[in-house]
Amino acid sequence: MKHLFDMKILMTADAVGGVWTYATTLCSALAENGADVYLVTLGPKPRADQRTALGDSGVKLIETDLALEWQDPDGNDLPAARRCLADLERRIRPDIVHLNSFREANFEWQASVVLAAHSCVNSWARACDDTDWLCDPQWQHYTRLAVQGLNSARVWVSPTAAFRDVVHEIYRPATPGHVVWNGIGPSAPSLPEKSAFILAAGRMWDAAKNLRTLAEAARELAWPVLVAGPGAIEEPVGGVLLGNLTRTELQKRMQRAAVFASPALYEPFGLSVLEAAAAGCALVLSEIATFRELWTGAAIFVDPTDRGALHDALAEMCADDRRRAQLQRAARERSHRYSIARMVDAYATIYQDLLASGQAASHPLAAEVCA
């Protein structure tokens, strides 16, 4: 059986959202454990500040001009993607291909393929109650390729059991899928000094982040609500928009924020919530299955469609020092469950089992370790 120190891994990722944080964190940790790792980007190229996430880990970054699957639902870019990725596989000769999208799993890979399902158009649209357009032929084509990708991969993985269930409901894959919680590095040894403000983060234009509701709930709060993320909310009625911050800048804000709020309608995992918890923020989260799975007992939950309830929960956090401190400690303690070491161990088990078996295999250890 191969171990990480003599394993070669080709991983794809995009730099648009949380997948970049996940991929760079995982790739760096795999490389630090001895794997030879190649990270291949699809979609918009990573910014200079995003590239710094790889540091001197030894991960080889390969940037392409290939489209992301949700940018190309008609599949016009597929022939170019097949050629490009086949050429990379011939040159790199990886033991494992780890894909962070669906349709590329349909390619004629020689290596064993692991597909990590982080999000999809269909589940996003359902959560946002905006599904009429999914009947268009291009999105039906997208859906067929997603189904085929799940069934073509030797193993597919979800970051939460709740999202795994959603993938099953929508796509009916032939294999059950496995849960590997996302992870981050260790937090600072002591709780940082906090300031009187509430922080949120997300793409302003993304309806699933539900930041408009947060902006409305922010009115007449004792503390300011600061929202970090690209884009803008049309006619914001409350809160301060910080614009797009680098990950380092956002983490510095998290270190100071007393409270972190996420009223998301849809969040298959929520890495920003995990990072805020590790920074010692009290969490006010939407009442959705993924957040309940990860944060029950360590957060306040509210109906994401009820701006009055969200306002009241945030007002309580501003006013109740004892309750806020208790939630800060609880969130920080819970964050230790979602460590990079645990995530690497789970993926190493999957990779090694695949290479040892020579056929699709179940991975009970990975599921037990992470869920």
Image (cartoon, rainbow, N blue to C red):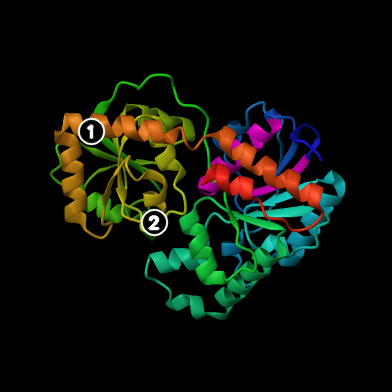
The residue under label 1 is 324
Q: CA distance from mark 1 to mark 2?
A: 23 Å
Q: Position of residue 371 (x, y in %)?
A: 51, 47
Amino acid type, label 1 = Arg
Task: Tell me if 139 is positioned left or right of 208 in this view.
Answer: right
Task: Tell me if 267 is positioned left or right of 303 in this view.
Answer: right
Q: Quadrant of residue 73?
A: bottom right
Q: Quadrant of residue 154?
A: bottom right
Q: Quadrant of residue 68?
A: bottom right
Q: Position of residue 323 (x, y in %)?
A: 20, 34
Q: In percent of the image, x 62 and y 50: which residue is there?
A: 364
The residue nearer to you, when weighing 318 against 69, is: 318
Residue 30 on the magenta segment:
yes
Check if mark 1's residue and mark 2's residue have beta carbons within 8 Å.
Answer: no
Q: Position of residue 170 (x, y in %)?
A: 52, 70
The residue under label 2 is 289
Residue 241 on the magenta segment:
no
Q: Position of residue 281 (x, y in %)?
A: 32, 33
The residue nearer to you, when weighing 109 against 153, is: 153
Amino acid type, label 2 = Ala
- Callout 1: SS: helix
